Image (spheres, helix red, strand yellow):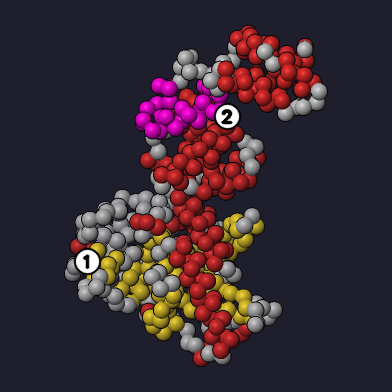
């Protein structure tokens, strides 16, 4: 069977959620499960209504373009993209396409996939208004206009991606960029991220740079989850490969398909139109406006520390492993939690161990967000301080951690001298000597070369103290006392 490689381009749509109002209207820009509550006359295209550009949405869009290494325009334009769907009351969408460049053009994104650094070129990044959302039922469709007019960033890549795994890694990286920069929550559960996927294949070994070697491009519209993107790409590569093998591929026209989650297949929607069919023209109700160099510099200086920056800091400055650093920065809220732990004075490696193992494990088990996690960084410090002072053993600390979560009480309520570990050298020496005085047979075996008997002595100390003996001190004193006998 002939081997084929895929050429994949993405059009990632992300709502700019961190603005008070929509991009051209005064309606609230906030997620609501109650339909048609964040709506103003402009969103419904009532006669006489005029758009007003949201400056904060433009600022965040320009910031995104800078992060992606794109160039920024001297003047800002908006255009009408003319087509009619029931989710666009005006019959056109306000977007950016041809004049002279959108908020950003020709940048690149570097991201990690399976520990390898990948690069995807950015064709353009533009700001537009989102459409309403449609809910389809058995015999009716409902329209929710809450989403209509929400500022939307569309990132268009060059077809530099070659697998579903790379595509998902790219999308996860971009989600972290939007979250860390404060541009968007980028929450796919709230419909804030959607993706169009373009896929074509060619025979392996041919020159990738020659467009003639690539097959017909197929667009898959509005895939709403990263898992959906992965499955849609894998299915489409398999479908196109089968068409190649059966000789039907050359008959396939450029087309738009949709991803059907229930059947796990892509389904034909329509022949693919070109940009000229949308009949773009400059929006007459929004005059072009100049983007000052001072404002651009102000925006550039306001770009916060991003995930890749934090990961480098965690590895280089805190001495964490690449794996632990990757776990910590994957979700901004978890990274913020860890940052707060370090600021409070918890040792960076100790904090990383608690967050990546105990806390992330608990979140996964309970299917919770860290925002809903009861134990705050200051509460975690109560536990780590108790370990550091010798008041708790690591085993006891985990018990206190579990108890605090179980009863929703601060860890300090379960930390006391009565249940603290024994770290007094004199007290431990007395206990150990009593055990050794009654263990002459085991001492003889130990002296005879049976080193594993040492664990027997440790176990006896723990049994005698009900697990409260400081394990490090116990081993030190045991070695010292055994050497005397």
Q: Could you say whether the residue bearing mark 2 is in a helix, strand or loop?
A: loop
Question: In terms of depth relative to the viewer, which is nearer, 203 or 383?
Answer: 383
Residue 352 x, y percent position in the rendering: 56, 37
**Does 411 sit above or below residue 162?**
above
Position of 2 with respect to 100 (left or right) is right
Residue drawn at x 46%, y 53% as measured from the top left: 178
396 in the magenta segment: yes
Circle nearer the N terminus (1, 2): 1
- Alpha-carbon span between mark 1 and mark 2: 55 Å
Q: Residue at label 2?
A: 347
Residue drawn at x 53%, y 90% as measured from the top left: 248
Residue 184 x, y percent position in the rendering: 41, 52
The answer to whether residue 90 is visible is no
Q: Main secondary structure of the magenta part?
A: helix
392 in the magenta segment: yes
Q: Nearer the viewer, mark 1 or mark 2?
A: 2
Q: Residue at label 1?
A: 44
Q: Which residues are magenta?
A: 386-414
Residue 85 x, y percent position in the rendering: 29, 75
**Does 379 sit above or below residue 211?**
above
Residue 257 x, y percent position in the rendering: 42, 78
Q: Could you say whether the residue bearing mark 1 is in a helix, strand or loop?
A: helix
Neighbours of disc 1 within 10 Å: few (<14), some (14-19), many (20+): some
Quadrant location, the N terminus:
bottom right
The answer to whether residue 247 is visible is yes
Question: In terms of depth relative to the viewer, which is nearer, 46 or 2?
Answer: 2
Residue drawn at x 79%, y 20% as measured from the top left: 447
Tag 1 and tag 2, C-beta contact below 8 Å = no
Q: Which mark is residue 296?
A: none
């Amino acid at each position: 069977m002939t081997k084929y490689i895929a050429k994949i381009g993405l059009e990632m749509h992300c709502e700019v959620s961190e603005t008070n109002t929509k991009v051209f209207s005064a309606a609230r820009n906030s997620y609501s499960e109650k339909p048609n509550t964040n709506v103003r006359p402009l969103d419904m295209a009532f006669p006489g209504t005029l758009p007003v550009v949201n400056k904060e949405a433009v600022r965040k869009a320009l910031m995104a373009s800078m992060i992606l290494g794109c160039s920024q325009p001297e003047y800002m334009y908006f255009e009408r993209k003319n087509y009619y769907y029931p989710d666009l009351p005006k019959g056109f969408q306000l977007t950016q396409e041809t004049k002279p460049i959108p908020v950003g053009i020709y940048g690149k994104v570097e991201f990690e996939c399976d520990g390898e650094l990948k690069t995807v070129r950015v064709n353009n990044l533009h700001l537009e208004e989102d459409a309403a959302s449609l809910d389809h039922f058995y015999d009716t469709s409902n329209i929710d206009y809450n989403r209509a007019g929400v500022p939307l960033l569309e990132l268009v890549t060059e077809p530099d991606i070659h697998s579903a795994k790379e595509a998902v890694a790219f999308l996860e990286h971009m989600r972290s960029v939007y979250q860390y920069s404060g541009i968007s929550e980028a929450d796919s559960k709230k419909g804030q991220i959607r993706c169009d996927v373009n896929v074509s294949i060619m025979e392996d070994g041919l020159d990738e740079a020659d467009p003639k070697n690539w097959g017909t491009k197929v667009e898959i519209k509005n895939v709403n989850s990263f898992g959906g993107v992965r499955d849609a790409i894998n299915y489409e590569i398999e479908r196109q490969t089968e068409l190649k093998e059966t000789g039907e591929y050359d008959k396939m026209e450029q087309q738009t398909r949709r991803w059907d989650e229930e059947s796990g297949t892509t389904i034909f929607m329509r022949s693919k139109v070109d940009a000229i069919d949308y009949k773009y023209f400059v929006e007459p109700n929004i005059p072009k406006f100049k983007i000052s160099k001072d404002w651009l510099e102000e925006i550039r200086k306001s770009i916060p520390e991003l995930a890749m920056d934090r990961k480098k800091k965690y590895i280089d400055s805190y001495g964490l492993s690449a794996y632990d650093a990757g776990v910590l920065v994957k979700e901004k809220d978890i990274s913020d939690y860890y940052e707060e732990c370090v600021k409070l004075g918890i040792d960076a490696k100790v904090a990383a161990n608690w967050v990546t193992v105990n806390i992330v494990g608990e979140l996964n088990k309970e299917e919770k967000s860290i925002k809903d996690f009861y134990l705050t960084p200051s509460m975690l410090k109560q536990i780590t301080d108790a370990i550091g002072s010798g008041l708790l053993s690591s085993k006891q600390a985990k018990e206190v951690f579990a108890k605090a979560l179980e009863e929703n009480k601060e860890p300090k309520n379960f930390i006391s001298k009565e249940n603290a570990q024994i770290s007094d050298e004199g007290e431990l020496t007395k206990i150990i000597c009593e055990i050794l005085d009654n263990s002459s047979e085991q001492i003889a075996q130990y002296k005879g070369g049976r080193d594993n008997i040492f664990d027997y002595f440790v176990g006896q100390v723990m049994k005698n103290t009900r697990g409260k003996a400081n394990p490090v001190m116990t081993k030190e004193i045991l070695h010292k006392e055994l050497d005397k006998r």
